[in-house]
């Protein structure tokens, strides 16, 4: 689950991480009121108006603007709220902006020049360890830094048996070139950031940029936070932060009925039980000359109601030319699934695309007979290669 910048900062602040302070607004008038309140609380005289969407590169799309007066706050907020923000991380249609963050100006004059760094905490899946990735090149796309100047990217692995050590935090601060008070601040920042990452069961914390202010404070100017969905039962307060407007409505609907669904750009709809089998099914579709239109795992209890809902969700995609149902009858019997398919087909009515059903496992033969005798336009198969051949024949 992804969080908005303001939500991520709220969590970070709760763990002692210094952040750029701000307040959320949903209208231009509210933005002005929040700017006034922020000025009273922090003393800032300039403000940054930031679009709150689940995508990076907002500044490149016009979603981050500086305001030097309350009138400019109103104008900037009015321009951003309601716009379809297109960034390198969105589709061509972009994402609609429903709210903005009115943030304090932290690039104020002082004894030294502000400096920007990049820092993220994430899981290195290859090594099975958390790591901190950081660079002196903050404010830039980390992918571009990795491509052009890879020597400027550092990583620090964290041993899960002992956690982040003080010497590691000091090494990070040293590699970033900080000294004096900024060095101490950076050490504290790194340790608090990692504590927050572990404390909320995150799978990603990305701060770009981390700022050293002109008076040597270290703070998070931005925050990109992703929570491990499997841990949300432990964090009910964080689960309530979920913004469904930022997610694909079809995927949200599927999740509400217990379906694991991801929309893809293809022509063969998939309905499978089990994530591993679903991935293998997508491979088979590709090998047969088609392209999977979705990942859909109906789980171990593929009853008629769930199968019907899965069919309806797949059929909303106008690009689907065929549907492949691939069920392994282990926990659930194949004949029960087959009956569910027949019932779902009758409830939906005329399905305009061919359906290939491959059932293997408990009562697979009975299931095939049930489908063959149903009188419906459903092609049955027992072997996976049979199903692949039917996909190739029907999709072309």
Image (spheres, grey):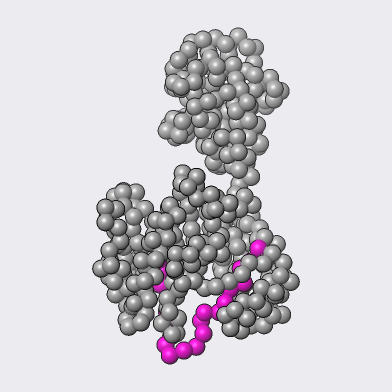
Q: Is residue 51 above or below residue 381?
A: below
Residue 266 appears in the rendering: no
Along the line of sight, the residue nearer the viewer: 169 or 80: 169
Q: Is residue 243 above or below residue 393?
A: below
User: Residue at coordinates 34% horizontally, 55% vertically from top-left?
Assistant: 130
Give the quadrant of residue 357.
top right
Say whether residue 137 is magenta.
Answer: no
Locate the C terminus by quadrant.
Answer: top right
Say whether residue 104 is magenta.
Answer: yes
Question: Residue lying furthest bottom in this view?
Answer: 111
Give the quadrant of residue 347.
top right
Q: Is residue 149 above or below residue 383?
A: below
Q: Which residues are magenta?
A: 99-119
Q: How many marks?
A: 0
Residue 298 appears in the rendering: yes
Q: Is residue 362 left or right of residue 53?
A: left
User: Residue at coordinates 51% horizontally, 81% vertically from top-left?
Assistant: 107
**Image location of residue 241, percent across then percent down:** 58, 54
Along the line of sight, the residue nearer the viewer: 239 or 27: 239
Along the line of sight, the residue nearer the viewer: 82 or 378: 82
Give the quadrant of residue 145.
bottom left
User: Residue at coordinates 36% horizontally, 71% vertically from top-left?
Assistant: 188
Along the line of sight, the residue nearer the viewer: 100 or 369: 100
Q: Is residue 124 left or right of residue 301?
A: left
**Image location of residue 196, percent across then percent down:** 42, 60
**Image location of residue 155, percent across then percent down:** 31, 62
User: Residue at coordinates 35% horizontally, 63% vertically from top-left?
Assistant: 133
**Image location of residue 290, percent across then percent down:** 51, 33
Question: Residue lying furthest right in this view?
Answer: 29
């Amino acid at each position: 689950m992804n969080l908005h910048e303001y939500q991520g900062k709220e969590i970070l602040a709760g763990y002692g991480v210094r952040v750029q302070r701000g307040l959320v607004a949903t209208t231009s008038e509210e933005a002005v009121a929040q700017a006034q309140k922020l000025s009273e609380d922090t003393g800032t005289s300039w403000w940054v108006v930031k679009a709150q969407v689940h995508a990076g590169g907002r500044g490149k799309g016009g979603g981050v603007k500086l305001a030097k007066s309350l009138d400019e706050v109103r104008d900037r907020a009015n321009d951003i709220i309601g716009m379809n923000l297109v960034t390198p991380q969105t589709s061509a249609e972009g994402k609609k902006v429903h709210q903005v963050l009115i943030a304090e100006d932290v690039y104020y004059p002082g004894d030294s020049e502000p400096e920007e760094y990049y820092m993220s905490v994430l899981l290195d899946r290859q090594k099975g360890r958390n790591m901190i990735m950081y660079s002196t090149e903050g404010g830039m796309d980390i992918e571009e830094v990795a491509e052009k100047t890879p020597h400027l990217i550092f990583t620090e692995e964290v041993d899960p048996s002992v956690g982040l050590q003080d010497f590691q935090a000091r090494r990070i601060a040293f590699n970033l070139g900080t000294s004096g008070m900024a060095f101490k601040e950076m050490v504290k920042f790194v340790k608090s950031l990692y504590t927050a990452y572990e404390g909320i069961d995150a799978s990603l914390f990305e701060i770009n940029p981390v700022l050293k202010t002109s008076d040597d404070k270290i703070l998070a100017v931005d925050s990109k936070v992703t929570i491990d969905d499997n841990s949300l039962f432990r964090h009910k307060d964080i689960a309530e932060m979920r913004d469904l407007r930022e997610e694909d409505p079809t995927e949200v609907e599927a999740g509400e009925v217990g379906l694991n669904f991801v929309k893809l750009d293809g022509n063969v709809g998939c309905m499978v039980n089990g994530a591993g089998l679903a991935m293998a099914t997508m491979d088979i579709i590709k090998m047969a000359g088609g392209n999977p239109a979705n990942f859909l795992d109906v789980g171990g209890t593929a009853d008629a109601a769930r199968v019907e809902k899965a069919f309806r969700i797949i059929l909303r995609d106008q690009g689907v030319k065929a549907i492949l149902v691939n069920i392994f009858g282990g926990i659930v019997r194949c004949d029960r699934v087959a009956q569910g398919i027949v019932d779902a087909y009758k409830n939906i009515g005329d399905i305009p695309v061919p359906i290939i059903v491959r059932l293997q496992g408990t009562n697979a033969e009975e299931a095939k007979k049930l489908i063959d005798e149903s009188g419906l336009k459903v092609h049955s198969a027992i072997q996976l290669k049979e199903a692949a051949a039917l996909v190739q024949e029907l999709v072309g």
